Amino acid sequence: MEEENNNPKGLIWAIILSVAIVIISGYLFPATQPEAPLTAPESIQSAPLAAHEQTPAQPLDSTQALAKTPRVKLSNSSISGSISLKGARFDDILLDKYKQTLSSDSPDVELLSPSQTAHPYYAEFGWLSNDPKLKLPNSNTIWNLKGSELTPESPITLEWDNGQGLRFVRIISVDDNYMFKISDNVENNSGRNITLYPYGMIARTPDLSNSSASVVHEGISGVMDDTLHEVKYKDLDQGESQDFTTTGGWTGFSDRYWFSAFILNNSQTGNIKVRNLDGNTYQVDYLGQAATIPAGGIGSNDLRFFAGAKEIKLLDRYAKKLGIPKFDLAVDFGWYYFLTKPFFYILDFLYNLIGNMGWAILLFAALLRLAMYPIAGKSYESMSKMKKLQPKLQTLQERYGDDKMKLQQETMELYRKEKINPAAGCLPLLIQIPVFFSLYKVLNIAIEIRHAPFIGWIKDLSAPDPLTLSVITHLPIPGLLDIGVWPIIMGITMYIQQKLNPAPTNKDQARMFALLPLIFMFMLGHFASGLVIYWTLSNILSIIQQKAIMRKHGV
């Protein structure tokens, strides 16, 4: 027994047999390997970048650039132009109601323009996929056209087959103003489910040398999740971008009078990106939520595209009819929105009543003066009393000139005794400040005032007075000093009005106030002539009112 237990051969054979059993059983019955977890395909982050064709050393004019691609014409009572069948690109829109200059032979305003021109500006829409093998329409795709011309009465249909079982159908319609509707359908006959992401983009190389020097925002504007966002061109460095997420809303490029934007459905969630691509080209784009199209099914996506003029009443109608949130904020109403927009509607009403925007502005000034009459009356009464009090104030100045504290005490005692509030005279000015800035905004933003004439040499109330000192004298007067006739008239009326007010007892203040008419004359000399005309009439009405009140109080 002891000999058997010490036999090493039996142990060796037992080990060999065990190993053999493990190997054979593993071969005959392999262990089931756990499947590698399926990872979701990387989600698409944004729309594709603009595919500008390289601009030649000598940029093409629009006619040459448009001739390079097949096109379908578009027209209605407000716009004309064409859509490129290459890429289904919106890159040719003229605003037929607006001229570039006051010249009788001036061409229409060109809003969108094609690649290879000096300042390309266009929009594209389409689909993206995570599958790199899936062929999708892009900026080089030539679409097949069904229809002859895009008008409000005749939409067009664009079709393209990718040869992999997907058929893309795009229906484009336009109203009688500036709103396009783009309806995309994808027929899936590939035999498998397909996931696509809708996108849209507007790309632009702006002419920043002609950018407006006024306070009107020019750059990228949009309402995302019911909040207005404005991005100036200078706020985006080369390669820099800003991202937003929104349900519904709109985003696009905003000029002083013109505007382009894509408008999402209010139930549509998208990622918005604004970016500076190369220092000169800017892009606004959106990427919608993934849409899975079942085999044999149809996927769809609808959105609207606006390209036109910032006609305030029209934007309000679109906002109401189409449910576009805060679409009127495409117009830069400024801080005093609650005044600026009503002022526009009042001016527009008066214009329709009278037929001339200049006279409408003057009537508006008269109505404002009438509305503020009670407040101004109290103020002018106070200033009349102050005027009568001037000799007594001068006496106090001579008596207590070296004792500032005593002078102040005696002056306030005199005011109390005579029942005068010295601050009351400032009230009309404080009220006029928001009125002034609101009207200034209206005259800068309202396209209805652009190129609106008045009497005489004023042909555009939104521009400075053209009859300047250099024009009159033919002398090389520096730009800051080269003001027109209306600013000079305004300065004179301001000087007369100031003379009716009590002069400050402090000599330094008196000198400063004496310079104000001159300062305002040159400062406002380069503002819109409509604003200067308004201010002039307002001064004249104030002078008449103040003179009447002074006479009543024996001044």
Image (tube, rainbow, N blue to C red):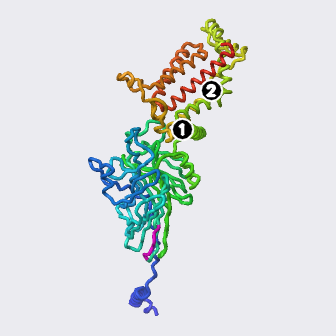
Instruction: Say the numbered circle drawn on residue 40.
Output: none
State the extent of the magenta-drawn residues as a range.
185-190
On screen, residue 333 versus residue 89, left or right, reads right
In the rendered image, which residue does mark 2 sit on?
A: 428
Instruction: Say the numbered circle drawn on residue 355.
Output: 1
What's the residue at 51%, 49% (across, down)? Answer: 222
Can residue 335 be seen in the rendering of this structure?
no
Foreground pick, 287 / 547: 547
The quadrant of the rendering that contains the C terminus is top right
What's the residue at 43%, 58% (across, down)? Answer: 47
Foreground pick, 178 / 287: 178
State how far apart marks 2 and 1 are (Cα).
30 Å
Can residue 305 be seen in the rendering of this structure?
yes
Foreground pick, 335 / 344: 344
User: Mark 1: which secondary structure?
Assistant: loop
* Picture coordinates of residue 253, whole percent (x, y): 45, 48
